[in-house]
Image (spheres, rainbow, N blue to C red):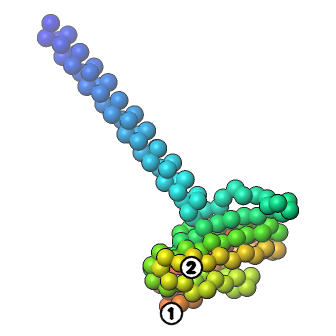
Amino acid sequence: MKNKNKTLFTGLILILTIAIGILTYTSLFSRDNAFSADKVSFAEKSDDRSDVLGEVSQNFRVEGGMYYFDPNEIRVKAGETVTITFVNVEGVHDFIIDEMNVRTRQISAGETDSVEFTPENTGTYEFYCSVGNHRAMGMRGTLIVE
């Protein structure tokens, strides 16, 4: 009888462990998906692929803070309109891509500025903040035109 109770107890512990693992995984997965959804609307490309005139567009929201951009890598398609909405969360910053003559205003925390451009040539281009030494302190990223 003792072995039967021990086996039953071990089985219950195993079932509880599996259930807790599944709940934890599900909770983390749901939280990650919610976070990813925030990131999609916040920092990555949306799937707004065409406007009223049938032109293809690519929209990105980029956050800038003390010496970072999020995301710090953006992939776009050549020949398609790109809109970058730059949101500053702290300090004073701007968003610049020299080779494409892309430049937001220098904005303060809580402000937003947008730029629109159409990259024609494939390649890799650096974007950065031109305020003080922010670029040297790591406030830069990469635009990849495919």
Is the residue marked by circle 2 packed among few (<14), some (14-19), or many (20+) residues within 10 Å? many
Q: Residue at x 79, y 73 (%)?
A: 118
* 1 or 2: tag closer to the N-terminus: 1
Residue pictured at 51% horizontal, 48% vertical? 33
Residue located beneath label 1 in the image: 132
> Closer to the camera, 52 or 132?
52
Please report the residue visible at 79 percent of the width from the left and 61 percent of the height from the top.
51
| Horizontal side of residue 82 vs 26, given as left or right | right
Which residue occupies the foreground of this view, 104 or 53?
Answer: 53
Residue 90 found in image quarter: bottom left
Depth check: 133 or 1 in front?
Answer: 133
Q: CB of mark 1 within 8 Å of CB of mark 2?
A: no
Secondary structure beneath dot 1 equals loop
Neighbourhood count class around disc 1 (C-alpha, 10 Å): few under 14, some 14–19, many 20 upward:
few
Residue shown at 58%/59% (left/top)?
A: 41
| Residue at the outermost right position | 53
Q: Quadrant of the N terminus?
A: top left
Residue 140: mark: 2
**Percent from the top left, x then y, of residue 133?**
50, 91
Q: Position of residue 17 (x, y in %)?
A: 30, 31
Image quarter of the C terminus:
bottom right
